[in-house]
Image (cartoon, coloured by chain):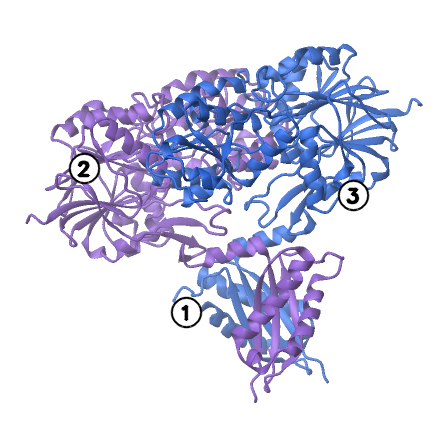
Chain colours: A purple, B blue
Amino acid sequence: MTDRNRLIYLPLGGAGEIGMNCYVYGYGDKGAERLIVVDTGVAFPDMDGQPGVDLILPDIDWLAERADRIEGIFITHAHEDHVGGLGHLWSRLRAPVYARAFTAIHARRKMEEVGQDPEQVRVVEAYPAVVEAGPFRVQFAPVSHSIPEAAALVIDTPGGRVVHSGDFKIDRDPVVGEAFDEEMFRDIAGRGVKAFICDSTNVFSRHPGRSESQLPEPIGKLIADARGMVVATTFASNVARLKTLADAGVAQGRSICLLGRAMKRMVTAAVEAGVLTDFPRTLSPEEATEVPRDSLMLIVTGSQGERRAASAALSRGSYLGHELKEGDLFLFSSKTIPGNEIGVARIQNALAEKGVLIVDEASGFYHVSGHANRPDIEAMHDLLRPQVVVPNHGEYRHLAEHARLALSKGMTGIVAANGSMVELSGNAPQVVEYVEVGKTYLDGSALIGAFDGVIRDRMKLALNGIVIVALIVDEEDEILEDAWVALRGLPETGAQGGDLAVMIEEELSAMLPRLGAKTIDDDDKLEEAVRRAARDVCVSEIGKKPEVSVLISRLMAE
Amino acid sequence: MTDRNRLIYLPLGGAGEIGMNCYVYGYGDKGAERLIVVDTGVAFPDMDGQPGVDLILPDIDWLAERADRIEGIFITHAHEDHVGGLGHLWSRLRAPVYARAFTAIHARRKMEEVGQDPEQVRVVEAYPAVVEAGPFRVQFAPVSHSIPEAAALVIDTPGGRVVHSGDFKIDRDPVVGEAFDEEMFRDIAGRGVKAFICDSTNVFSRHPGRSESQLPEPIGKLIADARGMVVATTFASNVARLKTLADAGVAQGRSICLLGRAMKRMVTAAVEAGVLTDFPRTLSPEEATEVPRDSLMLIVTGSQGERRAASAALSRGSYLGHELKEGDLFLFSSKTIPGNEIGVARIQNALAEKGVLIVDEASGFYHVSGHANRPDIEAMHDLLRPQVVVPNHGEYRHLAEHARLALSKGMTGIVAANGSMVELSGNAPQVVEYVEVGKTYLDGSALIGAFDGVIRDRMKLALNGIVIVALIVDEEDEILEDAWVALRGLPETGAQGGDLAVMIEEELSAMLPRLGAKTIDDDDKLEEAVRRAARDVCVSEIGKKPEVSVLISRLMAE
């Protein structure tokens, strides 16, 4: 190795937004570093920003151009925003994938779902086991989070040790899975930590985080007081919470039934991976219909208001033989993720119309976060004593606040949003380069770039509606007969009650004969003339400027 | 009056949602009641539910059909969700409008903006002054809220006294305007209250509400610690908050500049109505550019993340000569309304990228709500001791919880969502009829019904994109030449990189010649055949089923 070797960090997703985590580390000659990828997550689209899109994936063009330099892909845990993009992205990366057992089950499914080889995913043991990947030695250090077998990565290179926190909280009694292990992190810190890349989600939460073990008591009381059916929803992947809820139900003499595909899949995977050994016996939805309402507890998917999940189905009516009634209890043991408020409120209101009593996180007793709050982030800083803190897993304001926090504690804090390449080696780690990164949309089966204009066009259609005009130009460059007009997403009638499409046709009939040959000959000019005329009619009739698509059929001499 | 006289209440908007308040009271012979309208508010559309729509208005068909029975329109206060629809709806109601002075200024502007006669709005004095309107005697009882001159309505009829709370909080020191007047409400309660129609917004907030007067101290400290420019945003209509902010700035030696049209309009109206007498001198945006940054405080519009407001403009770059820099302070003295989280986060992240320090309501020190919390709602129940409580101004879950609360206190609580007609007279007030009510969208200058299909069509375009096909059928019912295809909101290329529009054209070229005369003769059948072929190509090439519009031009024999 020469002096020119460097250690770099490059976030491609997850730094400047919450979701879509994808980070690159590199070590080696400048511009020829060997690379590892940490996480290949997705984000979820919404109507406001990405109508019709199925998933948002990180833009990995930079990585794909350097695929021959990738030594491995490391998945910290099985949440969608960390593993959800693996199948879609793997064909462009083609490197071995490393994950712990529970995570690997999900990673393999992600590969299979899009026809990739699941055997590319290799199961690794936790710290102190080591994965050798080129110049990198990587260890999976167990952390507590809201899913089993979450891990921080301890990444050793000749340029120093980096700790990548992954998603974590400090929970010394997490109900399921590994408790936060302070001694292990002291051991990790012992050799000196160059850089700590750290979860910033809850940097604005100033109270210490609470433990999963604080939930059984209040949830138990709530169920004890319930007279009718009890339904609880949480993230399917929060296996500890599923157990907390199910145990609390059983303790109050209720039978447990899981509703929702994802939930059953998660419990099965947790049992298979050996992280869940004593989950109560559950009834099938059919069996559960035989149980008296006051002896039944449903644990269901859809805590975020997803329209197709079990919660939404139950709010609309009967689902798999179960229907909620006045006096039933519905517990949201979950936080509403920003952007999902309207969807959650829709379900809560529908449940309220049925007379169901709703309890949610507003009370503060029935949910704990899976991410480290500010004091817990500080505790990790203090344990690891890194030279530099690079905040990740956060919107820009989270990253900035976390960097300020590091600075206030005497460390270097570097704000590196997606595309900011940080050189961690040397005495003054800093951003050294900006890589252009966007987002990739999975739309049906197509991958489209966020800047391709497709989605912008769809949003224009949604905002403005569209007037479609068909014109025929004959062999002698004359416009044949009248234009045909159709409307989509526009009112049918104008200000005085006239038919809007007919009014546009009439305006075009009046306008087209006045056009000169130069305009008629030229598709662009002809389209522009038609567009202007159609828009003028719409502006005066409905006060709106629609999109206009003009199809010109030019007949050829035979 | 005969025995058949009855007193009815009918919410048309605002009960089952927050926003778009519009309530009807009636007294008289069943089916021939004389009517008054309370509030004519709007709600604001979003991309998720109403793309392209400008405003959401209550559906007043029921009222408009009975316009000859309307004795008056009463506006409780000048918030958009209470007065914003007046101009658009008045032409169908044509009754005198009553409001207090400050509210009347805004109500008249709403009339003028759409070409209605502002003189229809009559200024009335507060309680104990009385407006006589048919069988109704109405008094405007001042309440504290987040806008000047908010009023509850005391509505007397031969069938008893109704108190309509309007939006209110209990604030005994509201900085601007009238303090909550317990004695007045005792006086109102003295004659006995039949029904209390009451604001339910904060029924889930269990701590007592806080006073505006608690804000100056923490806000003053915050400004005292600021080194650079200070910017604060809140609702423009919250005149008390504008004064709290401006006074705090002046006390710390800063000059004040208001940015945003709505803000200047509100201050002007408040001065004009005599409710604001000692607002500090403000600088114009130009004058303010001459002031050193550490001596300046901007108070700006856009607390809800609105893209066109001053906050958003400042987050993007320079605005009217002012630009934020590292170390400046930006205070959100406001609550983010559910649904606006993403817009507010967008601005906060853009500000964070500039190095601006952001302080928002999360800390709990810099904003107080304008609505009564649960203990304050209970205090009003206790003051008025009504026979029946009908919750309004809330989503269904708020109404249900508020009715439960009333019940638990020994009163009758009736959940009446939009369209539920309640008979308040008699010994057992109850819902007696359901009126079909929807929503009306102002879309450009057109009013369209929520169920007209226009918006559903726009959402389909946004989700699926559209394939447009033009076909020519000649005089002999033969399809002429090839079909022309255009795409909007769809990727241009298919799975193997081929041109998607060309592939659809080719598929149609292969399919069309195989169609029989019966299909070609029939527009619907021909369209369906084309639609199916175009969709099949899209499903296999891009995994998506688009909308398809087919324009068939049938040439006529000359």
Examine the rendered structure and indicate whether residue B408 appears above or below residue B464.
above
Question: What x and y, as percent, mark residue A145?
Answer: 33, 30
Amino acid type at image mark 2: Val
Contact flag, marks 1 and 3 (Cβ < 8 Å): no
Residue occupying the point 29% across, 43% down? A39
Residue occupying the point 23% across, 55% down? A67
Amino acid type at image mark 1: Gly
Q: Which residue is mark 3?
A: B92
Q: Earlier in the sequence, mark 1 or mark 3?
A: 3
Question: What x and y, as percent, mark residue A210?
Answer: 36, 21
Q: Chain of mark 1?
A: B
Q: Please state which of the two labelled residues, at mark 1 or mark 3, is closer to the viewer.
A: 3
Q: Which mark is residue A162?
A: 2
Q: Are marks 1 and 3 on the same chain?
A: yes
State left or right for residue B96 relative to residue A214: right
Q: Secondary structure at mark 2?
A: strand
Q: Which residue is mark 1?
A: B498
Quadrant in which the C terminus of chain A is drawn: bottom right
Q: CA distance from mark 1 to mark 2?
A: 45 Å
Q: Chain of mark 3?
A: B
Contact flag, marks 1 and 2 (Cβ < 8 Å): no
Q: Secondary structure at mark 1?
A: loop
Examine the rendered structure and indicate whether residue A320 appears above or below residue B219.
below
Q: Are marks 1 and 2 on the same chain?
A: no
Q: Is residue B511 visible?
A: no
Residue occupying the point 30% across, 56% down? A61
Amino acid type at image mark 3: Arg
Q: Residue furthest left?
A: A2
Frontmost residue, B132 versus A184: B132
Q: CA distance from mark 1 to mark 3?
A: 55 Å
